[in-house]
Amino acid sequence: MNSTQEQADENRYGKEVAVAVSGCSKDDARMVFDVLRAAFTTDRASVDVPQDLGGKRPTVWNVTVDVSEARVVSGPITIGKPVTLDVQGGYWAVDELRRHLADAFTVRVVGTVSGDQEEEVRLRVESR
């Protein structure tokens, strides 16, 4: 199989990205989720907002994003503090997610783990 065919297959089948949001307030997590919902189809309804569960353990909020039909995010979004996102999916899908997040935030890659057909990337997003 040539690389063009492989990329076409990944574009068709590798369209979902799992996103874990942590290291932030529930309000900042909600802003990130709002951007993801504006840019892509997700498995979270707009009324399904991050909640604080209390306690001393860190909270992680999860969402699955379908990047196959991206929409334009209109401009920068302000969040209180930088937010950590752990994203996992096919190479094309993760790049597409990162590219659309950059429409709203400053996005920095802080770590990657590469696999055969998927990668896991830790991103830090912050206000521009």
Image: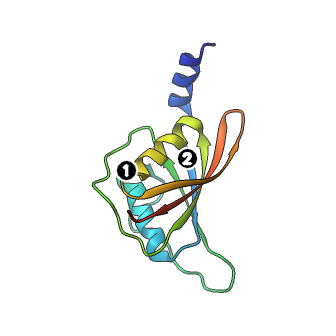
Mark 1 surroundings within 10 Å by alpha-carbon count, few (fewer than 14), some (14 through 19), many (20 or more): many
Where in the figure is residue 103, as x and y percent of width and height?
36, 51
Judge by depth and name the residue closer to the eye, 47 or 65.
65
Observer able to see residue 94: yes
Judge by depth and name the residue closer to the eye, 82 or 17.
82
Residue shown at the point (62%, 74%) measured from the top left: 59
Q: Quadrant of residue 10?
A: top right
Judge by depth and name the residue closer to the eye, 109 or 64.
109
Q: Name the residue furthest top.
A: 1
Residue shown at the point (55%, 47%) measured from the top left: 17
Helix, strand or loop under label 1: helix
Marked residue nearer the N-terminal end (1 or 2): 2
Q: Which residue is mark 2?
A: 17
Residue shown at the point (49%, 49%) measured from the top left: 65
The three-letter amino acid code for the residue at tag 2 is Val
Q: Which residue is mark 1?
A: 39
